[in-house]
Image (cartoon, coloured by chain):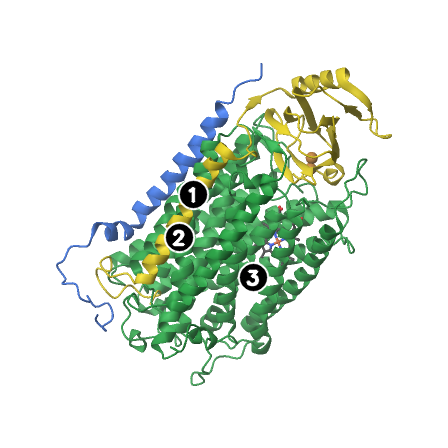
Amino acid sequence: MAIFPPAQRIWWKEPIERSEILWITIALVWSLILFFMMPYWHLVGEQNLSNEAYRIKPDVFAERTEAMADKYTVREEGDTGTPVVHPPAGGDIYMLARLWEWWPVLELEKDQTYRLHLSSVDWVHGFSLLPENINIQVHPEYEMVITVTPNRAGEYSVVCNEFCGIGHHTMVGKIYVVDK
Amino acid sequence: MSNNADFRICPDTGFKIHLPADKLIKWNAVTAVVFLLVGGIFGLGVALTRWPAVHLLPADWFYLALTAHGFDVLLVWMIFFEMAILYFAGAVLLGSRLAAPKVAWVGYWMMLGGALITNIAVLRGDSSVMFTSYVPMQAAPDFYLGIIIFAVGALLGCFVFFGTLVIAKQEKTYEGSVPLVTFGAITAAIIAVFTIATGAIILIPTLLWSVGYVGHIDSVMYKVVWWAMGHSSQQINVAAHIAVWYALAAILFGAKPLSEKVSRMAFLLYILFLQLASAHHLLVEPGLSSEFKIFNTSYAIYLAVLASMIHGLTVPGSVEAAQRKKGFTNGLFEWLRKAPWGNPSFSGFALSLVMFGFLGGISGVMMGTEQLNIITHNTMYVPGHFHGTVVVGSTLAFMALAYWLVPVLWQRELVFPGLAKWQPYLFGIGMGLASVFMMGAGTLGVPRRHWDMSFADATMPYDFPGAAHLMMGLNGIAALIGGIGGTIFILNMVGTILWGKPKSKAAAEPEKPAAPAQPTVVSGYGSAGTMAVPGTFTLAMVFLVAFVLYYFVNWKYLAGVWGLS
Amino acid sequence: MSDEAQGDGANPVDEPIPFMQQVLDNPFLLLFIGITVPTVFYLIWGVMEIVSIPIAD
Ligand code: HEM
Ligand SMILES: [Cu+2]
Ligand SMILES: [Cu+2]
């Protein structure tokens, strides 16, 4: 019994029942499949996070984001005062997280590829693109660069899903994807 | 040195129990249950707030309650109970005296003091930072201080456990190898030492930062080291509750491990690889390479998942073997049908085993896959997953053990045996459903740790589909059912200890859980390795099919979202 | 298989304990490897990667 010491002085040499060996073999094969799915998806899949990241001072990141907004703002989002920015396809785009907003609103073109830069200027935030359900952690002083290719036109929201203080549940931004 | 006057012989089990160990086990277990009550109340407050139609608490109270809930149940309830398990598996199962009971008491009071300090800091309202306390968000210094004191106390408990192993060996209180359950407890204690050490590495500088002696803490670095503690502490729970499963199989059925070798090797895989899974929390973090993520999140090629799948076969397999030996040999499942489903120790154990695998295990592997984490990270899927592991898995297993341990240690009858019969079903199925509904909401993108999914105060609100609101409502209802189950458990435990009738020696009902005092009750107690267990094998294959299907469905889901590279 | 408590079963008393069983019977060896493996593969590797993140130009 498992609550008493093993009866035999040497238990290492006991035979193992066939179904147990069979199960261990099956489980091992499944473990290998689970493992190789990840590198496999890096080769053939279209959803992989890049490993591109930099250290960056929050004010530098804010400057770059503002520079993009100054150049490519096309309108304002409702009466929120937040600019809607339509950067050229294929280029670098920035989204900045701060208490408690995602800034600015981006307008992207369907099936175009962008280099999305994400960072925070204060605390840790969570970039959650809905209804896609793409979730990425955003840290202060680190900039993550992800190549994104929106595949459907429509209106998307960016919800914050890392707790960031009492206004956390109000932190929602937007991304529009338009047909060209 | 101790003499025989320091021991008592347990009338139910024949175990020789060192009196100081007896007292420590009792106090740690009782304290654990009290914190389960406190944390459970906060949990209900949280669940009822996240039920959109109820929305019970205001925002600041919600975040406060969520911080307290995470801390009190995940750390305090679990680790106090695990201290009781360590002392039980060390001193009682080995028939040994406990090493340095004084140190164990210092550990106990430090844990209690630390838990109170942190709770007070949270209740004061200036430390609602969640139990993960990601920097640069800052809590009051005593929030960190309390956790550190708690952790050091727990470390002392681990040292006492290891010391007890040494004493038992020196004084030859047992021969050969330690029992398998004790080996599982060793696994838990080893993981605990790593957990606590990394906790100190990260929380001490954070404490210094909160009082101004350290200028800056890097937020990614913090997360890496913090989760070496945070996730490993979950692995203590897993190792401990699997040890409890083996113990319950032995106590309830006289079951022998199918093979000592296989079960112990599976625990060894835990010791080696389980803790690497801390990387689960870093899969969408900037700056960590895919190589690091893949190697660590997969526990080095899923060897710890392999170990869990092995335990998943050998635990019920040992029960099947024992039942078949008793003559329940008809068909595949007579052994299971004729099991004591009305005994809460058994039903709790059985539900814990099944739901830990199907709910917690499958979802955990899915979510811990590098790319699949993108579609689950920080959504309600995450609490859904871990209520499937640490609540219906570990907590329910500990409850099942308590139904046996408390009457035996206190020598009292359960006060509400009728209610106890239903309790594991209410708690297990209630929280199991809660886990499923939370995962459902997470699949629709509902964020975790979030006060208002209707975004009433946001300037650009997002409209969740009705199904998402429905899921969170159903979660609230399921949480209520689970809460009733939890309440019955606590009433039974506290009531039994305070007012339970002393056990009469003669009365031995057929369903009463009791360990056979003499190994002769079962014929020999080597491994049961030569028994075929076709029923368990069939169940295991059902599990595998569910696992494979669910896993690939999620890849399909991922393949549909925006291209990312 | 012997029915006696703590019996020696089928193994003669002088047969040496197999290596792996000795490893599994040694909690302090297990403690050592249980701390070393995650420290090296998770903590040290992880911290090294963060430290080597380049600075944005
Ligand atoms: C009556 C029983 C319980 C109920 C109703 C309950 C409910 C909940 C709910 C609704 C959440 C919130 C999710 C969110 O908004 O992010 C939550 C979080 C959590 N629960 Fe429970 N729970 C219960 C028991 C437990 C137990 C026994 C444990 C551990 C042993 C546990 C561990 C946690 C943890 C660690 C969190 C995450 C806290 C955080 O995000 O910081 N819960 N629980
Ligand atoms: Cu935020
Ligand atoms: Cu937030």
For the residue with label 3, is its CB less than 8 Å from the closest atom of ligand 1?
no
Q: What secondary structure is marked by label 3?
A: helix
Which of discs 2 and 1 lies nearer the camera? The answer is 2
Q: What residue type is labelled 3?
A: Val
Instruction: Report the quarter where the N terminus of chain B lies.
Output: bottom left
Residue under pointer 3: B33
| Chain A visual colour | yellow
Q: In this view, does B259 lie above or below B200?
A: below
- What residue type is disc 2 on? Ala
Amino acid under disc 1: Tyr
Residue extending farthest front: A180
Q: Which of B530 and B98 is in front in this view?
A: B530
Q: Disc 2 and disc 1: Cα gap in Å?
A: 14 Å
| Residue A120 in the image, given as x and y percentages of width and height | 66, 27
Which label's residue is closer to the chain start, 3 or 1? 3
Of badges 2 and 3, nearer the viewer stands 2
Q: Could you say where residue A25 lies in the image, as x and y percent from the top left? A: 35, 53
- Which of the 4 image quadrants contains residue B409? bottom left
Cα separation between marks 2 and 3: 36 Å
Work out whether residue B125 or residue B288 is closer to the camera in this orientation and state it. Answer: B288
The local crowd at label 1, few if under 14, some if 14 to 19, many if 20 or more residues have their Cα within 10 Å, is many
Q: Residues within 10 Å of mark 2 (few under 14, many from 20)?
A: many
In the rendered structure, the colour chosen for chain B is green
Return the mark for residue A27: 2
The hue used for chain C is blue
Quadrant showing the C terminus of chain B: top right
Q: Is residue B308 left or right of residue B262?
A: right
Q: In which quarter of the image is residue B532?
A: bottom left
Above or below, B58 relative to B337:
above
Q: Label 1: which residue?
A: B299
Give the spatial CA distance, label 3 vs label 1. Answer: 32 Å
